[in-house]
Image: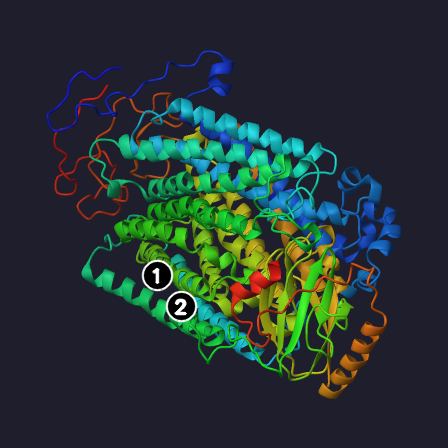
């Protein structure tokens, strides 16, 4: 038996071994010792460790549609799908070209390749045309679609990401993440921030359905990323400066909020919930909580008094500089 | 050695005439350790890089294990590394793992191998020089890298462990109040040293390519590998100082209590500075860095595709020009790493548009690669397979970059596994496959032995398929919303269903790891038992194949005169063979090189 066949056999056997080992976790010696830790570390996912069950979950399940609750998420999803499909078409063309060349341009003894440096007019024309086709059909369309969703940097009424809502109908929320959890603050019935009736919640953000929510964020310590996968977009919260974005929800329910930006060891534990309720329920909740906040307000407690002024003339807060100045006061 | 004659047509001072010939080293010490010889330094970089590659890859396996089997002991070495938790990777160790994996793979694995080893080895040989322009600087570059490696290695053994803030090391998390301990300080010092080493190397490469090209070799007569390495060196020399400034300021923050990046967090009233400033400094370097890593691979792929299609590189001039255009553009697009920092809309728009512009030059040289293979006579050697694999993965990675360039989809995909999948396809897979192609191709010249083609092909398929699978699957996970750097994402309801996919990725990762082991085995096996390599086993015309394998200490007995381009294949005027050496004068094919200095 030659060296190569031996190596081949070793590889095949080790493949088989690993597959068997994976489907049968009990085989691994190290695992028998770790049974106790397994329970401690991983209670939620323990059920999937049972033999074979993980394979039933399969990779197909990955493609299940997640709920998208914001009114604009479909436009981002559209751009994602469009980019994916068109680039996949180009990718397929490329793949077929490579495979074609490999199969049909294989070297034959005594034959010479077609001699060209590709400097000719025709070659230039073809390469540049193809390149332009890719650029226009992919990049330019993506760029336009992206600006259609962000809006113009000089102010516009077509986009949504940079078109921050204002006015009395907008729900305003201040978010202050910290290691490792989320503080949320909403103005009480007086509609002003940093007053005694502010509603401060921990790891739960309550908002009404179908209303625009304007978010201002400032971190307590390190940089965190505020992300609700169900509304698609995310924004960083930084210490020392206010960042902002807006979203809304068209569905009632509980949705998970995750921290997207690495913020330390327990980064993965920064779970919070977005609780979307009907408009009337929200008004009731707000009144009740505001009253309760006023009743239980304690001057000696520093912890919940982290809020900042929303900005000059509250509804118009779109100037980042004024927001920053007021936040730094 | 001094020049004996000078011609009127060249400058009074021509460094090509002044090239020093090293004395043949006598002792072990001067031959292998304190060597000025660029070939020995290249091998030192190679060994250094391979060692760290193994460390980094094992870390990536541990990361994948923690994702696929949360709460279970890591097989075989788990109990040795984490006895306190019976072999289970704890969350703090997981944070360390992905930080060090990123750092090691970028600065200690790909950079030393692709730029350190192949840059050092190829630049003098391919441009027809005896050595680098500054051999001492070259040696200093390796030994500084080595010291940097030692410092990084030491950081594993300090109390509280090594750095655990992600390879980007964003303050305030990386500042002393949030990450105390010596680990991250050593990380900063190590990268500072490594950066200095790379700057020394880069200056050397740039100067060597400009001053020491053999007579007759214009910039467009250089092989495209040299173009890639040269552009990389220029970017390195320009942008590593920016990183160094960021690291230095952060080091001052950590050790001497300055406040460049602290920014008056609510928990730290009264402090000053701005953490976003660090992000700007980091990404001004960080975006060129991804091109620093991929540019040499692009160049080598361009060359190898031409060599093994037995056909001139399609429009090589424009490939070189568009590679330069990418290098220039790469310096003004870094903002797309920071879209979620609430950057000003105008700046965001500018960065999006500029990022999209990169696809014009990259499209051109990508089409040129396909054009090179078109109507060629393709020889499917292992090196060719790896080059094709690199083209394929780079295409995939490049196209998925579009999702991240557009602001709206970026805000959705930022900090998810989509980003991880994307940059691993370009920076890791394409660069790795390019490196392996280069290894299989230049191994005969490096060590004088042929690598086994049969093991090589198994190695290729064991690397290529799993890599593509892993990173495409990671992108799917990212689209589903799995944030990166999560120890246990399955604590969230919407990610519970992703565990199955993670297990498939683990299988692929193990196969890729075995493939890598096989590749290293192939290197060691071939080094000892491989077939002896002839001077020009691949029938290629570039200058390094005109001398013996491995090359003598002084490389060229006589500095060659270049009369042909690097990719003269299948020329119809030559019938007995399908290649022409760069030094071989053929009437009607070669250009006339005028007055040439008579060199030693």
For the point 52% across and 42% down, which residue is it?
A: B246
Quarter of the picture containing the C terminus of chain A is bottom right
Q: Secondary structure at mark 1?
A: helix
- Residue B290 visible in the snapshot: yes
Is B93 in front, or is A269?
A269
Disc assigned to residue B580: none
CB contact under 8 Å: marks 1 and 2: yes
Instruction: Report in which chain the residue with disc 2 lies.
Output: A
Look at the picture and state if B560 lies above or below A259.
above
Is B151 in front, or is B135?
B151
Look at the picture and state if A84 lies above or below A4.
below
Q: Quadrant of residue B518?
A: top right
- Can you identify the residue that label 1 sits on? B360
Is A70 in front, or is A322?
A322
- Can you identify the residue that label 2 sits on? A139
Disc 1 from disc 2: Cα separation: 9 Å
Quarter of the picture containing the N terminus of chain A is top right
Neighbor class of circle 1 (other Cα within 10 Å; few <14, some 14-19, many 20+) is: many
Look at the picture and state if A313 lies above or below B325.
below
- Residue A16 visible in the snapshot: no
Task: Residue A137: give x, y in percent of width and height.
Answer: 38, 72
Classify residue A132 as left or right of residue B54. Answer: left
For the point 73% across and 70% down, which residue is it?
A: A195
Q: Quadrant of residue A207?
A: bottom right
Task: Residue B213: give x, y in percent of width and height.
Answer: 27, 32
Task: Residue B290: give x, y in percent of width and height.
Answer: 47, 49
Classify residue B528 as left or right of residue A240. Answer: left
Q: Residue furthest left?
A: B8
Is B300 in front, or is A171?
A171
């Amino acid at each position: 038996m030659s060296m190569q066949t031996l190596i081949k056999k070793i590889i095949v056997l080790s493949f088989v071994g690993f597959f068997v080992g994976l489907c049968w976790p009990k085989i691994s010696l190290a695992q028998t010792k770790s049974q106790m830790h397994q329970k401690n570390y991983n209670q939620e996912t323990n059920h999937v460790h049972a033999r074979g069950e993980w394979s039933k979950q399969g990779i197909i399940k990955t493609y299940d549609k997640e709920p998208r609750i914001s009114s604009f998420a479909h436009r981002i999803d559209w751009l994602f799908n469009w980019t994916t499909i068109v680039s996949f078409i180009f990718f397929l063309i490329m793949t077929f070209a490579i495979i074609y060349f490999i199969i049909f341009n294989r070297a034959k003894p005594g034959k010479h390749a077609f001699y060209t440096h590709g400097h000719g007019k025709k070659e230039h024309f073809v390469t540049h045309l193809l390149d332009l086709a890719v650029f226009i059909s992919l990049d330019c369309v993506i760029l336009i679609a992206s600006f259609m969703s962000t809006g113009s940097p000089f102010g516009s009424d077509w986009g949504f990401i940079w078109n921050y809502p204002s006015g009395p109908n907008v729900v305003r929320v201040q978010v202050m993440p910290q290691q490792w959890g989320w503080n949320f603050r909403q103005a009480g019935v007086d509609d002003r921030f940093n007053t005694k009736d502010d509603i401060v919640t921990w790891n739960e953000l309550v908002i009404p359905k179908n209303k625009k929510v304007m978010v201002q964020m400032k971190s307590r310590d390190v940089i965190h990323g505020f992300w609700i996968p169900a509304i698609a977009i995310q924004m960083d919260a930084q210490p020392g400066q206010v960042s902002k974005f807006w979203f809304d929800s068209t569905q009632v329910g509980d949705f998970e909020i995750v921290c997207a930006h690495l913020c330390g060891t327990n980064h993965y534990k920064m779970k919070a919930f977005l609780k979307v309720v009907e408009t009337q329920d929200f008004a009731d909740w707000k009144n009740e909580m505001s009253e309760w906040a006023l009743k239980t307000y304690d001057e000696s407690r520093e912890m919940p008094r982290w809020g900042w002024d929303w900005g000059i003339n509250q509804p118009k807060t779109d100037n980042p500089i004024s927001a920053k100045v007021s936040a730094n006061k | 050695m001094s020049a004996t004659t000078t011609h009127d047509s060249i400058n009074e001072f021509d460094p090509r005439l002044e090239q020093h010939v090293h004395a043949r080293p006598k002792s072990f010490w001067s031959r292998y350790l304190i060597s000025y010889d660029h070939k020995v330094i290249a091998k030192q970089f190679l060994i250094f890089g391979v060692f760290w590659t193994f460390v980094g890859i094992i870390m990536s396996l541990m990361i994948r294990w923690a994702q696929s089997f949360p709460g279970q002991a890591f097989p075989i070495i788990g109990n040795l590394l984490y006895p306190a938790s019976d072999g289970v990777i704890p969350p703090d160790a997981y944070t360390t793992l992905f930080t060090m994996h990123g750092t090691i793979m970028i600065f200690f694995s790909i950079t030393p191998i692709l730029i350190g080893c192949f840059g050092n080895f190829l630049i003098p040989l391919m441009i027809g020089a005896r050595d680098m322009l500054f051999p001492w600087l070259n040696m200093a570059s390796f030994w500084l890298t080595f010291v940097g490696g030692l410092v990084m290695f030491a950081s594993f053994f300090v109390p509280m462990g090594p750095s655990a803030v992600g390879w980007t090391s964003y303050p305030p998390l990386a500042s002393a109040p949030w990450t105390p301990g010596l680990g991250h300080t050593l990380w900063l010092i190590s990268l500072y040293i490594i950066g200095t080493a790379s700057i020394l190397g880069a200056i050397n490469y740039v100067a060597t390519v400009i001053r020491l090209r053999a007579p007759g070799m214009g910039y467009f007569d250089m092989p495209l590998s040299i173009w890639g390495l040269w552009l990389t060196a220029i970017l390195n020399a320009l942008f590593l100082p920016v990183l160094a400034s960021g690291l230095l300021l952060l080091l001052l923050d950590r050790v001497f209590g300055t406040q460049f990046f602290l920014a008056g967090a609510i928990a730290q009233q009264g402090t000053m500075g701005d953490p976003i400033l660090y992000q700007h400094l980091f990404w001004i370097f960080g975006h060129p860095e991804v091109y620093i890593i991929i540019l040499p691979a692009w160049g080598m792929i361009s060359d190898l595709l031409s060599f093994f299609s037995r056909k001139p590189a399609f429009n090589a001039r424009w490939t070189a020009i568009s590679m330069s255009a990418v290098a220039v553009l790469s310096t003004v697009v870094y903002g797309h790493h920071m879209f979620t920092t609430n950057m000003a809309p105008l700046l965001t728009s500018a960065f999006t548009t500029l990022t999209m512009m990169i696809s014009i030059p990259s499209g051109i040289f990508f089409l040129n690669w396909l054009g090179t293979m078109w109507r060629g006579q393709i020889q499917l050697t292992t090196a060719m397979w790896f080059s094709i694999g690199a083209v394929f993965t780079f295409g995939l990675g490049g196209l998925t970059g579009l999702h991240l360039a557009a602001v709206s989809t970026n805000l959705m995909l930022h900090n998810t596994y989509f980003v991880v999948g994307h940059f691993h396809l370009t920076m890791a897979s394409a660069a790795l496959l390019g490196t392996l192609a280069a290894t299989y191709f230049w191994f005969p010249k490096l060590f004088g032995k042929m690598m086994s083609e049969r093991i090589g092909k198994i190695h290729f398929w064991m690397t290529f398929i799993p890599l593509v699978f892993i990173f495409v699957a990671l992108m799917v996970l990212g689209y589903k919303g799995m944030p990166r750097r999560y120890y246990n994402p399955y604590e969230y309801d919407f990610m519970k269903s992703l565990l199955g996919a993670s297990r498939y990725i683990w299988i692929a990762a193990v196969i890729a790891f075995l493939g890598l082991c096989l590749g290293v085995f192939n290197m060691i096996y071939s080094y000892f038992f491989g077939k002896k390599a002839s001077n020009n086993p691949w029938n290629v015309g570039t200058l390094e194949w005109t001398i013996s394998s491995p090359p003598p200490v002084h490389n060229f007995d006589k500095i060659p005169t270049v009369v042909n381009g690097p990719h003269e294949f299948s020329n119809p005027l030559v019938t007995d063979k399908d290649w022409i050496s760069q030094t071989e004068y053929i009437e009607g094919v070669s250009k006339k090189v005028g007055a040439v200095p008579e060199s030693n």
